[in-house]
Image (cartoon, helix red, strand yellow):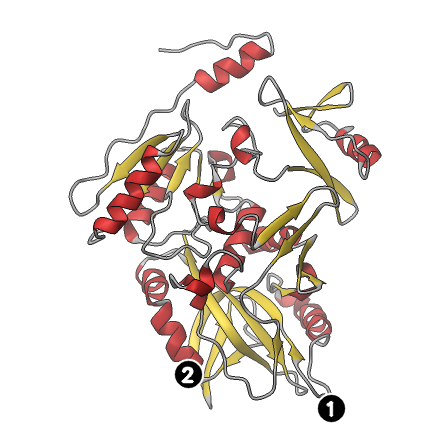
């Protein structure tokens, strides 16, 4: 159990008194200190929907013990390192995060739709100063904690849980003069008994951006996050049919659909060929005065049945193996990072020193190998590398008890050793 120091008092994470103490220091100069390390690590307090929570200070995730819920691998092991501090700017003094987006949240009349997910290309536009639409999805997934896995999470993730924590993750995230939560639409889990109420709440939320009679200038857009049920032909083009939204579809023109299928061919093919996966869409959309929604830009992400993102069949096999073996790990997310650049497939957090797991893609060239070698050589963590086209999956690093031993010793208790 994580212990915090607040002022001169020590309190455990699950204590009933913790939130009262956080409310008392919210807005003050007093910071809670996480004691997962003997020296302690400062954190800060945020208020979300009337409740108080502890958050990491910027760039301190790697300072926490790997077993601590606040631990994060070094940002440079994923695409986060490219955008943190530029496209993502945290301000712990006021508890907000500013997001700089590469895509627009307004639609000028007559403007053509942009290339779907164009932020993933290795171009000057994606130098890390702005988030692509896929990168925004990765950021929210990261903030909601769905890139993390431990055995205790088995069977506890569904669309209701995802929606709750993604919406919570969007709070206090500001972009283009608005709070992201006010621009985000995530469908409610469908229930036949609640069908009418769900439809009424959806209409009320989307009416805030609906095009009005005589409206001039740019139209407002919202951001959709939904699981794809089908990308189907419509009378004049195509439509996104989302799960939990069988009675409400999102139109897309033929050109957008063509470019989407080309750009996200891997994600679509992985989802189609592997049972139990989820294909998650993020899109900007507008609503006309008739109440019809049309997509302007869109990105896709494929996940396991436990909603952990993956990019290839070898990654899926690794994640499945780690899950079956009841390992604790954190999945690396790409954000804006080009597909030709290496990143951590996973970081094991149940080894004495966090172990970064890399998969060398079949057919990757010398430039990729050099970049991977630089990541491994410059890391303070242990490394594990798999070449799927050359070998079977190497043995997984063993679970270590040294971290638990150190923590219990710090508390004055020595755990029993086995074996």
Residue 290 in percent (x, y) is at 66, 87
Q: Is residue 310 visible?
A: yes
Reading the image, the residue beneath label 1 is 213
Q: Is residue 359 visible?
A: no
Up-down: is 57 above or below 94? above
Which residue is located at x 51 percent, y 47 percent?
Answer: 146
The front one of 90 and 56 is 90
The one nearer the camera, 413 or 352, is 352
Q: CA distance from mark 1 to mark 2?
A: 28 Å
Please, which residue is most extreme toward the left here?
390
**Residue sitting at 53 percent across and 69 percent down?**
283
Secondary structure under badge 2? helix
Q: Taking 267 as reference, is 143 left or right?
A: right
Answer left or right for 52 relative to 409.
right
- How many labels sit on residues? 2
Q: Which mark is residue 255?
A: 2
* Residue ID at (27%, 37%): 385
């Amino acid at each position: 159990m994580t212990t915090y120091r607040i002022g001169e008092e020590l309190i455990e994470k699950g204590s009933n008194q913790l939130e009262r103490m956080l409310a008392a220091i919210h807005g003050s100069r007093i910071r809670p200190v996480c004691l997962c390390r003997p020296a302690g690590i400062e954190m800060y307090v945020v208020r979300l929907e009337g409740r108080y929570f502890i958050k990491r200070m910027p760039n301190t995730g790697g300072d926490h013990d790997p077993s601590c819920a606040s631990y994060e691998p070094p940002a440079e092991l994923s695409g986060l390192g490219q955008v943190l501090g530029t496209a993502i700017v945290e301000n712990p003094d006021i508890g907000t995060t500013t997001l700089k987006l590469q895509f627009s949240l307004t639609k000028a009349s007559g403007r053509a739709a942009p290339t779907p997910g164009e932020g993933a290309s290795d171009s000057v536009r994606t130098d890390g100063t702005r988030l692509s639409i896929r990168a925004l999805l990765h950021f929210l997934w990261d903030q909601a904690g769905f890139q993390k896995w431990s055995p205790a999470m088995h069977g506890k993730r569904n669309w209701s849980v995802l929606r709750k924590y993604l919406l919570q993750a969007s709070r206090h995230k500001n972009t283009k003069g608005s709070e992201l939560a006010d621009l985000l639409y995530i469908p409610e889990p469908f229930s036949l008994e609640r069908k009418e109420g769900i439809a009424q709440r959806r209409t009320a939320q989307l009416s805030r951006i609906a095009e009005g009679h005589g409206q001039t200038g740019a139209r407002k857009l919202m951001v959709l996050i939904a699981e794809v049920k089908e990308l189907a032909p419509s009378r004049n083009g195509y439509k996104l049919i989302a799960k939990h939204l069988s009675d409400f579809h999102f139109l897309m023109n033929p050109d957008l659909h063509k470019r989407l299928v080309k750009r996200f061919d891997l994600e679509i093919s992985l989802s189609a060929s592997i049972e139990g996966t989820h294909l998650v869409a993020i899109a900007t959309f507008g609503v006309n005065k008739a109440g019809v929604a049309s997509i302007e830009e869109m990105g896709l992400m494929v996940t396991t049945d436990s909603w952990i993102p993956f990019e290839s069949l070898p990654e899926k096999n690794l994640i499945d193996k780690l899950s079956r073996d009841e390992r604790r790990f954190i999945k690396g997310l790409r954000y804006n990072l080009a597909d030709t650049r290496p990143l951590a497939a996973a970081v094991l957090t149940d080894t004495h020193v966090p172990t970064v797991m890399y998969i060398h893609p079949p057919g990757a060239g010398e430039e990729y190998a050099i970049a991977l070698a630089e990541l491994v050589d410059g890391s303070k963590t242990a490394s594990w590398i798999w070449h799927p086209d050359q070998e079977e999956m190497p043995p997984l690093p063993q679970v270590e008890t040294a971290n638990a031993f150190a923590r219990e010793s710090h508390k004055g208790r020595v755990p029993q050793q086995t074996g």
